[in-house]
Image: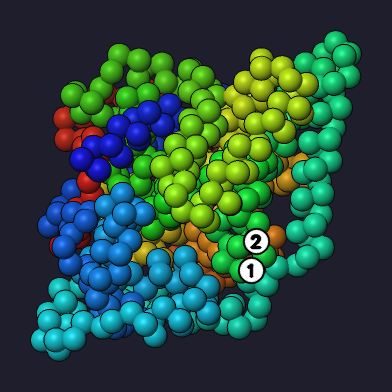
């Protein structure tokens, strides 16, 4: 089944989508988890798909049927059947696209049916209504506008790093042509991933025209990434649905039940860097696989297949046609990236119930980090502003530093925590989590990572 294939792929990826590593001596409690209660959420691929958007019930059944093939019969939106999808819908689409789509999408026509759906759906909280109004103000103020000079500087700095690494690789000088080349090119590869991440999320014309950047310079396809990553943003830290949490049997985020436990869990805080190093190897394979499966689509062929084909000769040239260097660059870049992408969620609240308040769920499951120097700020690639990114994923990452104090003040005014740590503290926090879970006894009541979340009663 589709869910079985997803679970198998998640197990394969479990070696890499895991916690970060840092200094010893840190302390941390186990992550807060919710009890599995309520009615099981609607299964993926349900025959009817009706969601609430902007206080109106929209019938997406026909739209869903038309998108079944491209999403392998499943779509993250299926998880919001008979639930409020306003904030996810707004998060993934531009203001212009939202207006166009909502003008075309059909409403639930039977008034009695709409009333029944409304009665069964969780009410919109005041926090969420205030957030929606605030986001509209930010859009009106131009926070989603890109600055050409900033984009040029970002790409230019990345290109200089690629050039420096290539020069090292071809220098023939001991150490410089090996270790220095690998470290520099690995940094450039990680930077290419952050730039591509920003462009894939972006919904402006510039980003539409830059979809090829990730496949050409990072070896990562936008179709595969969008499907996987949008699910993570839609149901962040919901156990059994967010694939970024499906890390066992390589690592564990909470004390497992006896059936899910393995002997090597006791050592997970010691071997974590080894599975980290596989991240980009697996992501590259997944990207190529999905792009090849959809090669009949002219857009996929032009924006993904051709750039992916061109990527490897360019990458080999940068590495002086050395296969060991190529593998080392991918592995080291994987470690850099895995350390950065995992620390913002895994020590935060984990949910074993569907979360009806998307805004509060993002704030409860995400943590920022404060960089200690300009180089660190650069290599984090905007991922140190994860709270901002999860609430406003299509906003250019260059706007997050200025948005951070504004968001912090908004959270304080609404009585919710704006979670943030210094960069070393957030790394230590995650390492301590893995150490604590490694030393914990089995929990007979613990669910498995693949157990689907339930809908809150």
The reply to whether residue 33 is visible in this rendering is: no
**Residue 211, how many percent across, how many down?**
60, 54
Q: Furthest-top residue in view? A: 174
Q: For the residue carrying disc 1, how many other residues have a C-alpha within 10 Å: few (<14), some (14-19), or many (20+)?
A: few
Q: Residue at x 14, y 54 (%)?
A: 40
The picture quadrant where one finds residue 318 is top right
| Total labels drawn | 2
Q: Residue at x 66, y 78 (%)?
A: 142
Q: Residue at x 61, y 37 (%)?
A: 309
Classify the position of the N terminus by image quarter.
Answer: top left
Image height of 338 relative to 209, above or below = above
**Residue 184, how many percent across, how many down?**
77, 29
Q: Are marks 2 and 1 in contact (CB under 8 Å)?
A: yes
The reply to whether residue 124 is visible in this rendering is: yes
Pointer 2 residue = 209
* The disc label shown at residue 382, or none: none
At mark 2, the secondary structure is: helix
The picture quadrant where one finds residue 123 is bottom left
At mark 1, the secondary structure is: helix
**Residue 312, how many percent across, how many down?**
65, 31
Question: Real-space Cα distance between discs 2 and 1?
Answer: 6 Å
**Residue 21, how many percent across, how many down?**
55, 28
- The coloring applied to the image is rainbow
Q: Residue at x 89, y 13 (%)?
A: 173
Classify the position of the C terminus by image quarter.
Answer: bottom left
In the image, taking residue 6 as reference, residue 298 lies left or right, namely: right
* The disc label shown at residue 205, or none: 1
């Amino acid at each position: 089944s589709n869910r079985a294939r997803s679970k198998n792929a998640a197990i394969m990826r479990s070696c890499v989508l895991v916690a970060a590593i840092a200094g010893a001596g840190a302390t941390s409690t186990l992550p807060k988890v919710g009890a599995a209660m309520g009615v099981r959420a609607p299964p993926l691929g349900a025959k009817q798909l009706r969601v609430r958007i902007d206080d109106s019930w929209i019938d997406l059944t026909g739209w869903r049927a038309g998108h079944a093939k491209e999403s392998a019969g499943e779509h993250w939106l299926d998880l919001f059947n008979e639930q409020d999808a306003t904030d996810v819908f707004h998060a993934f689409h531009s203001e212009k696209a939202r207006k166009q789509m909502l003008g075309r999408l059909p409403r639930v026509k039977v008034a009695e049916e709409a009333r029944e759906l409304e009665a069964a759906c969780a009410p919109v909280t005041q926090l969420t209504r205030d957030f929606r109004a605030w986001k509209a103000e930010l859009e009106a103020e131009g926070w989603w506008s890109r600055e050409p000079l900033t984009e040029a500087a970002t790409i230019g700095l990345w290109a200089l790093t690629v050039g420096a690494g290539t020069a090292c690789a071809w220098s023939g000088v001991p150490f410089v042509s090996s270790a220095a080349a690998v470290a520099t090119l690995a940094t450039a590869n990680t930077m290419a991933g952050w730039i591509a991440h920003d462009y894939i999320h972006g919904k402006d014309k510039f980003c539409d025209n830059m979809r090829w950047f990730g496949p050409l310079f990072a070896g990562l396809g936008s179709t595969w990434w969008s499907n996987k990553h949008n699910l993570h943003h839609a149901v962040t830290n919901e156990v059994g649905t967010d694939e970024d949490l499906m890390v066992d049997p390589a690592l564990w985020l909470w004390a497992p039940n006896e059936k899910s436990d393995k002997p090597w869990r006791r050592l997970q805080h010691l071997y974590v860097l080894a599975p980290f190093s596989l991240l980009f190897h697996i992501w590259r394979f997944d990207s190529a696989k999905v792009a090849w499966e959809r090669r009949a689509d002219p857009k996929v062929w032009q924006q993904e297949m051709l750039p992916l084909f061109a990527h490897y000769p360019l990458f080999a040239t940068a590495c002086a046609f050395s296969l060991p260097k190529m593998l080392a660059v991918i592995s080291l870049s994987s470690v850099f990236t895995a350390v950065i992408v995992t620390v913002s969620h895994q020590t935060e609240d984990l949910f074993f119930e569907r979360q009806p308040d998307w805004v509060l769920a993002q704030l409860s499951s995400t943590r920022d980090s404060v960089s200690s120097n300009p180089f660190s700020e650069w290599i984090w690639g905007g991922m140190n502003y994860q709270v901002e990114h999860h609430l406003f994923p299509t906003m250019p990452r260059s706007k997050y530093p200025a948005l951070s104090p504004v968001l912090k003040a908004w959270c304080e005014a609404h009585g919710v925590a704006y979670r943030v740590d210094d960069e070393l503290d957030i790394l230590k926090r995650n390492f301590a989590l893995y150490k604590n879970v490694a030393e914990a006894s089995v929990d007979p009541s613990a669910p498995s990572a693949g157990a689907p979340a339930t809908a809150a009663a």
